[in-house]
Image (spheres, rainbow, N blue to C red):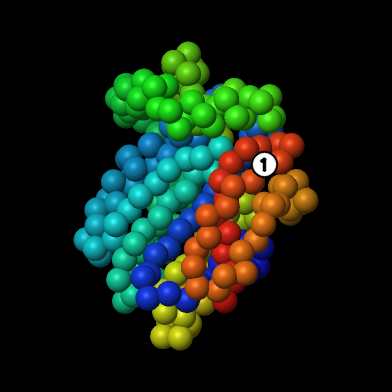
Amino acid sequence: YHGLNTAVVHTDSPMVEIRVKFGHGAHHDSIPGTHHALEHMLFSGRNEKIVDALETLGANINAYTDRTSIVFTAACVHDVAGNVLDLLADMLNPEGFGIDHVQWEKERTTIQSERVGYETNQSEIYWTELASLLINDRRTVVGRKDDIDSITPEILMKEYKDMYFRQNVTVAIMCNTNVHKYAIEKCLDALVDSIPLRPDFHTDDIAPPSHISTDTEHLVYNEHVNSNELGVTYAFDVA
């Protein structure tokens, strides 16, 4: 949709998702844990008011980082799906967003505690070992202690501004498309206007998932492995 990766799924359980990729090109050499730290910091500062607004609308917000992307989701009722998507887009827009050193030091302590849990989590150990065997990559999503200690607010902001552009973002809207068709188009138009297009970026730089769902009703969870990354992809059939 004007360079924006878009998926619209007809469902009676509304949810919106924005996925920002980083697992390609120069970002493949980023300090491990940078994007997980960025996910944490996107709930801070200016965005605290946006999170409050989302919760006032009754949205159930969640975020996670995998080996390829930072993902934000919000489950909500049909009538506010458009407002929720607009607010999520505002939350992820790096313009006007900054990371305070004091906030980062506080959050760094939280992330280090989280790291300890990851290092004893059998699922995380499995994925790290599998990545090591298949693509010679022992990096973890959270990063090691020294990795987290070396991350600065300046690194976080530079990384985010580098990765937040239209061809690198996927928006998924799950709602009753028969009722909200025009509202969806309005939201997508607003998103296109707010996310910069990068003319020098080619989609061939991103390896495609090994399978795209043909299921028109359900979100399908797919695992894929390629020469550049090991990760998990949500695949949608575009309605």
Nearer the observer, 64 or 218: 218
Q: Residue at x 49, y 26 (%)?
A: 125
Q: Amino acid at mark 1?
A: Val
- Residue 196 shows in the view: no
| Outermost residue toward the top in this view | 146
Relative horizontal placement of residue 58, taking residue 161 as reference (left or right):
left
Q: Residue at x 69, y 29 (%)?
A: 135
Instruction: Give how far across and how far down residue 143 sits, in percent.
Output: 49, 24
Relative horizontal placement of residue 66, taking residue 47 as reference (left or right):
right
Q: Quadrant of residue 41?
A: top left
| Outermost residue toward the left in this view | 56
Count of marks, rendered view: 1
Instruction: Give how far across and how far down residue 114 sits, in percent.
Output: 35, 26
- Residue 124 shows in the view: yes
Q: Is disc 1 surrounded by few (<14), some (14 to 19) or many (20+) residues within 10 Å?
A: some
Is 136 located above or below residue 196 in the figure? above
Which residue is identified by label 1? 225
